[in-house]
Amino acid sequence: MELKTIQTPRVPVRYYEGGSGKPLVFLHGAGGIIPTDPFLDRLAKKFHVYAPLLPGYGDSQECPTLRDMLDFTLHTLDVVEALGLKDPILTGHSMGGMIAAEMAAVAHNDFTRLGLICPAGLWIDKHPIADLFAMLPYEMPPYLFHDVEMGTKLMTAGVALDNPEWLKGFLVMNARQMGTAGKLLFPVPDRGLSERLYRIKAKTLLVWGASDKLILPIYGEAFKKAIKGAQLAIIPKAGHLINLEQPDELVSALGQLN
């Protein structure tokens, strides 16, 4: 995957591009994108992938004028237009899935295929979503991974979670990224999406990790009920970060949109 830059009306956008085949836009979650993401590499073997970074993620420029969900939705639609894409397969993970769903609802004639990977955006009182903003690093892996030990190693590249230097770098990066994510997810990710999902016309595939403890699989059923004709695929031995734990199974599932 090659890291590039494109100009949009609000701000320059950094994005990863690679692969061949049908164009697919992937919107990342609150954790961002790591350069060695195995999911993107595998995805690029089936699709021509465009994975834009939200402002404030990676080395991208921040954009204070993006204040709410409508701003982020229109901004990402601007990104798709700037890339010159017409009816790409639109996909997103977690927070990115929330943005993708909003895009498909607002611009419902622009997208015919939609892949939502354990998306945020809904709220069920009996099954509240854990508050990642209040968690310390060592508290996160059980919510994000099926295999907590493996997940911890992925998060830290094998460095102990209490290592001072790693912790310092993590907190600096996390503060910058969560400053953006907080506009959409804090204190709860309910921005009225449930009232707009009926507008989605795209063929929609929902993919969930069976062991997702951050956004429980019951949310997948709620999305499926709200989006006409949506299908739900549950992948075993995967938590919320299904893209890191089971990238092959996730790409295989998204192949239904090809």
Image (cartoon, rainbow, N blue to C red):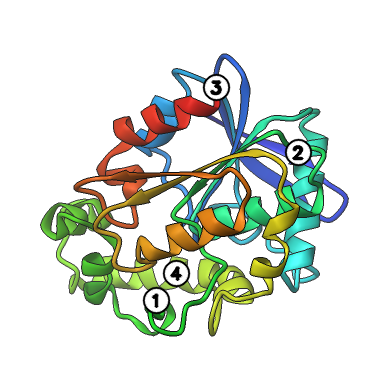
Residue at 35%, 66% in the rendered image:
216
Asked if labels 3 and 4 touch by Cβ distance under 8 angstroms, the answer is no
Say whether residue 79 is left or right of residue 33.
Answer: right
Q: Position of residue 155 (x, y in %)?
A: 27, 57
Q: Earlier in the sequence, mark 4 or mark 3?
A: 4
Amino acid type shown at disc 3: Asn
Q: Is label 4 or label 2 in front?
A: 2
The residue identified by callout 4 is 174
Residue at 46%, 25% in the rendered image:
255
Amino acid type shown at disc 1: Leu
Element assignment for label 1 = helix
Residue 258: image tag: 3
Q: Is label 3 or label 1 in front?
A: 3
Say whether residue 48 is left or right of residue 128.
Answer: right
The residue identified by callout 2 is 80
Element assignment for label 4 = helix
Q: Position of residue 120 (x, y in %)?
A: 51, 64
Looking at the image, residue 88 lies above or below residue 187: above
Q: For residue 161, what is the image quadrant?
A: bottom left
Mark 4–mark 2 Cα distance, whole angstroms, equals 26 Å
Can the viewer see residue 1 in this picture? no
Asked if labels 2 and 4 touch by Cβ distance under 8 angstroms, the answer is no
Q: For residue 45, what is the image quadrant?
A: top left
Q: Earlier in the sequence, mark 4 or mark 2?
A: 2
Q: For residue 66, what is the image quadrant?
A: bottom right
* Quarter of the figure with the C terminus: top right
Amino acid type shown at disc 4: Asn
Residue neighbourhood size for the residue with mark 3, other residues' Cα within 10 Å, grouped as few (<14), some (14–19), many (≥20): few
The residue identified by callout 1 is 132
Mark 2–mark 3 Cα distance, whole angstroms, equals 18 Å
